[in-house]
Amino acid sequence: MKKYIYLLFGAISFSGNAQINQDLNSIVKHVLEYSPALKGQKTLLTVGETKSQIQKSYADPTIGYEAGITRIDPVSKATFATGPTSTVLQFQPNMNYTTNFVANQVLYDWGKNAQNIEKIRLENKLTQSQIDVMSFGMAYQIATIYHQIHYLKNVLTIQTAELKRIKDQTTIVEQQIKLGEAIELDAMGWRIKVSNQENKVSETQSQIAKLIDFLETQAGKELKKELTNTATLNQSSEGSIENNPSFKQLDAEKAILEQEINVQSKASSPTLSGVATLGIRNGYLPRINGETPPIADDFKVNSMLGIKLTVPIYSGKRALYQQNIAKIQQERVNYLKEEKNTQLAYEVRQGEVNLKNLQDKMALQATVIEQAKYAYKLAEARYKEGTIKQLEIDQAQNNLEEAQLMEENFRLQMKLQQMDLLKAKGLRFWEN
């Protein structure tokens, strides 16, 4: 059982243009459409679009409202001698009231906001490439399970045929006991064989049921119709490892790092803004001898319109350090691409050799099966003539069953190897 668990979660790929039937394509599409994990990843695209809208909004004006009360003590006063008494003139009130609307608009930022918008766009592109890599791996996992199910179904057919043969022979032996031609010990041996073979059949059925349950869970629906026929894979030399989605993900990471360098290069650029205020404040009339003028005369509408230039002068070289980090990470991505290229090229070379070996083994195994069938027919004929014992005909049948099971194993290994090559070359069979 461990063998099937390892195969279930193993990597899956295939070289070439695969003529995989529509049943498998349909299953893969159902899984990719239903997968909650993929849907969760796709929400990050919406988050990225929202981040882009937020960044674009920095080019829009900001409008706010301000209100304030300020008391100033002391304030400047001037005393004038005007006859018998003096006149005190206060140019600013102690209590200052202001209320106004403030608008700020960036007029020119030397491309800083545009660079940040582009970085967010590239981050969204990276998210999409990560989703593609996830979908790619999931599709091949499903294809692997699909072929394992059909392999086990073929194994079940062989095991069931062998079970029928053993049961038929058991019936014959039990008849011979009644006729006095065999002893009870012979029948007991055959009953044990039946029990052992039934356990094999039951184990295979259990494995098939578990894999189908896993597949239907991933697809969110029953797949009895789609699992009726097995797919056919045709080897081809088309495709290239450069199409592997892992490279697109690494390229997307590298593009973000390049853009980060561009963003940090603009960190010391100035920002030119327009500022405007419109509101009401008091203090337009001076206070004479401490008397407060009427509100209608003292409170007036005021406005201000101006341009502000903000120039960063020193920030502890933070932008330079950020650029250096991005450059180091770019170097890391280059190494990762080189490693991935070497790895995939090796997998393709080894996969093609393994596939050739499996094809040779399949051809040889076909001969072995024919020989095993012929040997069984001879043993069966000799057994009827009484020239060999039951043990010998059982051995011939076991050899035939093992040869057939070995052929099915080779067939599965060929399909998995073909899919390994397909995956390495980045071919998306389910979209054909």
Image (cartoon, rainbow, N blue to C red):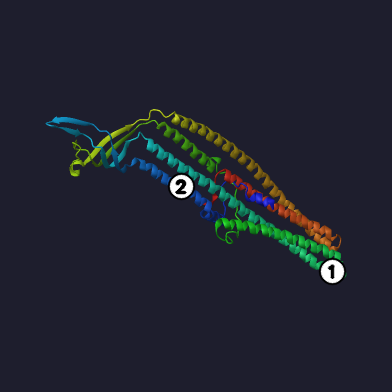
Helix, strand or loop at label 1? It is: helix
**Which quadrant would residue 185 be assigned to in this image?**
bottom right
Q: Locate residue 409, reporting x and y percent.
A: 69, 51
- Does residue 37 appear to the left or right of 191 in the view shown? left
Q: Using the numbered discs, state the Cα–Cα distance from disc 2 to disc 1 in whole angstroms.
A: 75 Å
How far across and down, in percent of the image, does residue 34 sit?
52, 55
How crowded pointer 2 is (Cα within 10 Å; few <14, some 14-19, many 20+) is rated as: some
State yes or no: discs 2 and 1 in contact (Cβ < 8 Å). Answer: no
Which label belongs to residue 310? none
The residue depicted at 48 percent of the width and 40 percent of the height is: 252
Whether residue 15 appears in this view of the structure is no
Q: Nearer the viewer, residue 105 or 209?
A: 105
The answer to whether residue 110 is left or right of residue 185 is left
> At which x and y percent is residue 122?
45, 40
Q: Amino acid at mark 2?
A: Leu
The amino acid type found where label 1 is placed reads Gln
Mark 1 nearby-residue class (10 Å; few <14, some 14–19, many ≥20): some
Q: Nearer the viewer, residue 357 or 420?
A: 420
Where is residue 422? Give x, y as percent: 58, 46
Q: In the image, what residue occupies the spot 12% across and 31% down? A: 84
Which residue occupies the foreground of this view, 147 or 362?
Answer: 147
At 18% from the left and 43% from the top, the residue drawn is 294
**Mark in the foreground, 2 or 1:** 2
Q: Which residue is mark 1?
A: 176
**Residue assigned mark 2:** 45
Question: Which is nearer the eye, 120 or 315?
Answer: 315
- Residue 302 shows in this picture: yes
Disc 2 is placed on an element classified as helix
User: Eyeballing the image, is 344 above or below 411?
Assistant: above
Residue at 45% across / 33% down in the picture?
261
